Amino acid sequence: MLPYSEFTSVGKVSNPFSEAGEKVFLFDLDTLVPSPFGRLDEKFARYLCDFAQQRPCYLLTNANYGEVMNRLPSHVRRAFAGVFAAAATELWGKYDIQVRHEHDFSDDLYEFLVKVVQTSAFSDKRSPMLDNGSASLRMRLSGTHSTANQRAAYATWEQEQGELPAIMNEFRIRFPDYRIYRDSDTSLLILPATFSTALVRSQLLMRHKTACLIGYLSPQSVTSYAAPLCEALLGEDVLSHISAPSDVSQLLSYEIRHMVSGGSAEAATVSGFVEA
């Protein structure tokens, strides 16, 4: 990625790079490990850890922290300054949880979701279908632990039937005090209206007073639960729409070269993993 330009090959950068403030990096888990049951590539994991030793890095995901543990090796999780899990309703440090938003979902809401499951016309439904966090709910009608082929089968069927948009429309009418997002091709995410992912920006500023946020988020996250965070970005922040780990690697390569060319004290420590 070149400074003062748009990264049009994978998306766009909302603002040019700036020297103002401390650069803090926010990675979407789905951009690092696209498969819900995949693992981070070992070589890329080392590359990412080396980078995280030079710049404060955080993770953002709609998944629970247990899924983060399955998809990222422990040394990668420890290299991050924090993990915003369950659609940022939880903030995990290197070893324990630091912030957790609590919310009691109503019985009426659960009854509605049960009815949705029962009335779905998809023939190959698998349970469990709900992933309940402290202040978040995710529903996947193909099954929370469905395979890639099973999710693909549901996605194909859903494109023809339009089931998820219909569920979302009815939900918004019945439960105006909640926000519902289509956070993947096969799943819906529910958050209380009292919570907003814009709080991620506030929490980062509490830890990094002069933070310039560099966000690498998937297009799906940007248009769903992370939209409030994107709207809260400041003038010096940067948002890149990322579709694959290779795109992240390319952008980090630019950042590393930028550090080295800056001639700072950190250059000597990062120069060992600059790509040829």
Image: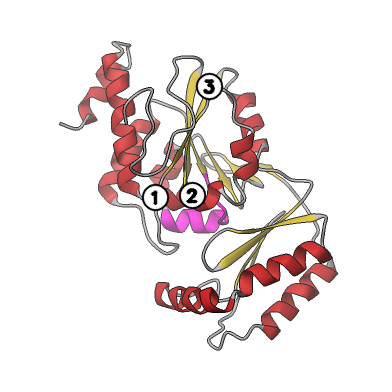
Closer to the chain start, of discs 3 and 1, is 3
Location of mark 2 (residue): 219
Nearer-N-terminus badge (2/1): 2
Question: Mark 1 Cα within 10 Å, few/some/many (few <14, many 20+)?
Answer: some
Q: Say what amino acid the circle numbered 1 marks.
A: Ser
The magenta-colored residue range is: 60-71
Label at residue 103: none
Per the image, is 62 magenta? Answer: yes
Where in the figure is residue 16, as x and y percent of width and height? 44, 24
| In the image: residue 238, left or right of residue 129 | left
* Camera-side residue of 28 and 158: 158
Which secondary structure, mark 1? loop
Which residue was labeled with disc 1?
243
Which amino acid does the dot numbered 2 rest on?
Pro
**In the image, what residue occupies the spot 41% across and 51% down?**
72
Is 264 located above or below residue 30 in the figure? above
Residue 257 within the magenta-colored segment of the rendering: no
Question: What residue sits right under mark 3 in the picture?
Answer: 236
Visible in this render: residue 170?
Answer: yes
Query: Along the horizontal axis of the image, is 75 left or right of 23?
Result: left
Q: Is residue 53 left or right of residue 222?
A: left
Residue 128 picture location, percent across and down: 60, 76
Instruction: Between residue 103 and residue 225, name the one nearer to us.
Output: 225
Kind of residue indicated by mark 3: Glu
- The quadrant of the rendering that contains the N terminus is top left
